Image (tube, grey):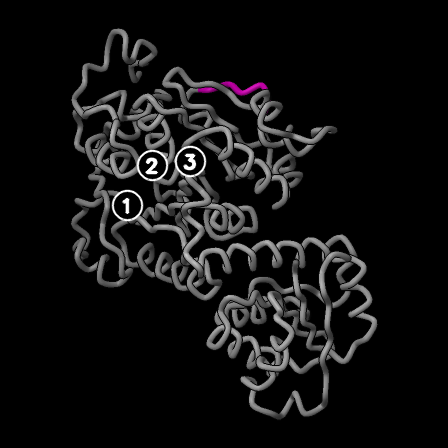
Amino acid sequence: MTSLALLTPDARFEDRARDVLPDATVSRRWREEHERIDPTKVVQELVAGGATVACLGPGVELDTLFEVAEAFDRERPEVVVLLVAPRSSEVLDRAIGVGVRDVVPPDAGPSELGRALARAAETAARRRSNLVGGGEEQRPHRVITVLSPKGGSGKTTVATNLGVALAAAGGSAAIVDLDLQFGDVAAALALTPEQGMADVARSPVPVDATTLKVFLTGHPSGLYALCAPDTPAEGDEVTYDHAVHALRTLSSAFPTVVVDTAAGLDEQTLGAIEHSTDLVFVCGMDVAAVRSLKKELDALDHLGMTVARRHLVLNRADARVGLEPGDVQAVLGLPIDAAVPSSRAVPLSLNAGTPIVVQDPRSAPARALQQLASRFSDQVVSVGSEPTGARWPWRREAR
């Protein structure tokens, strides 16, 4: 059961929290001294009743809120912290820096407040499970999310090639396009989906493992794709809850689910990260890309999203631009799991709608991507396998 601790002088907010989270145990604490005493002591008071979620505010000075949040991050990282405060870029930046899970406006309606508290409760349950070492055994299936803070990094190339390689290895695999505004997994795989993520969001009936398959588009390799909406407007219909439910459902039906994401860290991407076993970070060989990815890694650390295994793909790794792979590793603190060199074959394969692991399996980029896929399966098709005939009868030549 969720135990919610509130730090606020606002008794009406306590009533609102009880209304939107009726199954939780809710306790509110407030004394004027809370704005003056050691934040660590405030944390001790709030968790005295076994709190799993702490909601700080409203009606408290921002500096006090951030000091208490920082104390939670330092002393009790298993407790999920929400801030109830006006949202601004400055507040959000500071919140991420002290490990706050979410910032909720004081005037949030019941629906928005309820979703935020429910997500926090769910995250708290996962953190407790992971801290006692039970997380991975309870999730035998892999959810592999491909990430990069910048567009044009090669996320979709990595995600689609990874998905096809794993599916062709004999396993059952799915790919989800969570770049809801401008996703192009369908184009990269030469698919013409009849339904996709937008239809999942609009479904008038609950979507389970059986009904979800109606929304998937099959690829000849054996990969099944849940494609992005056709327009940005339709993408706005897909909420965090829709995305998370689709991932949960697919991971119960497929041994491996690969997730392509939008640039940055929107709420759907954060939902995917929370439900992932593995994170694949794609980085280019330029200072801006490395610095942006370092910021993204730091943000995930502050948010407590440190359970999933992390993998680094260095794209255009042979570019001579004054950086060496060792420099990238040193800055990011991650070993390079795959170094994909520049090659004309990559854009040719994208234009043909045929992943390079199939289009040109003996090329250096294909070998690097197969090496990455081998980390997730012992049965990945060996690089250099004959790409014509029975194994790849659907291969299309680049034009």
In depth, the one of 225 and 11 nearer the eye is 11
Tag 3 or tag 1, which sits nearer the N-term?
Answer: 3
Tell me if residue 2 comes above or below residue 46 in the rendering. Answer: above
Q: Which residue is mark 3?
A: 258
Near mark 3 (Cα within 10 A), the count class, few <14, some 14-19 or many ≥20, is many
Q: Please identify, in this view, whether the residue under mark 3 or under mark 2 is nearer the observer.
A: 3
The magenta-colored residue range is 191-195
Q: How far apart are labels 2 and 1 at the CA level?
A: 8 Å
- Residue 353 placement: quadrant: top left
Q: Position of residue 392 (x, y in %)?
A: 29, 13
Q: Residue furthest top?
A: 389
Marker disc for residue 158: 2
Near mark 1 (Cα within 10 A), the count class, few <14, some 14-19 or many ≥20, is many
Near mark 2 (Cα within 10 A), the count class, few <14, some 14-19 or many ≥20, is many
Q: Amino acid at mark 3?
A: Val
Q: How far apart are labels 3 and 2 at the CA level?
A: 10 Å
Marker disc for residue 313: 1
Q: Amino acid at mark 2?
A: Val
Tell me if residue 23 comes above or below residue 350 in the rendering. Answer: below
Which residue lies at the image location 40% right of the left edge and 38% below the top edge?
142
